[in-house]
Amino acid sequence: MNQEIPKFAQFNLSGIGCWLTVLATFMLLGAVGLNWIVNGFLILVGFVLISPVIGLLVFRWWLKRNLVESQCPVCSHEFTGFNQTECQCPSCGTPLKVEQGGFSRLTPPGTIDVEAVEVSVQQIED
């Protein structure tokens, strides 16, 4: 064996016989008039190769439409949730609902949610 030939210049032809057999079978089927079998097989192989790419693109589109990243209205912790679902803030544990691109606080019926406003103190001189 010649040790002077680099490894990248050597070819491995061990699987070429299998491919030649498949090619010969396809050519024989086409010559006999069963070309529709070859076409069906090629369409099936094309579908198997293309469907994961299309599935990935559809999944990314769906994720972009339904994934919401916003802040908790109570503690301002930023996290991610799915649109139209209920979740809890991982920081403060407040139950939240994801709607319209943001989080809103879930409160039991009859609860009035108010916001405190800071008022500055001024003394009036007489």
Image (tube, rainbow, N blue to C red):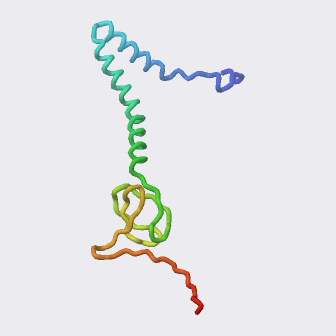
Give left or right: position of 8 versus 80: right
Give left or right: position of 100 versus 121: left
Residue at 68% over, 25% down: 6
The residue lying furthest to the bottom in this view is 126
Residue at 38% over, 66% down: 96
Residue at 33% over, 10% down: 30
Residue 123, compared with residue 62, is above or below; it is below
Give left or right: position of 90 versus 44: right
Residue at 42% over, 72% down: 93
Q: Quadrant of the N terminus?
A: top right
Residue 46, compared with residue 27, is above or below; it is below
Residue 24 % position (x, y) = 39, 12
The answer to which of 31 and 39 lies nearer the viewer is 39
The residue lying furthest to the top in this view is 31
Q: Name the quadrant containing residue 42.
A: top left
Q: Quadrant of the C terminus?
A: bottom right
Residue 32 % position (x, y) = 29, 7
The answer to which of 72 and 26 lies nearer the viewer is 72
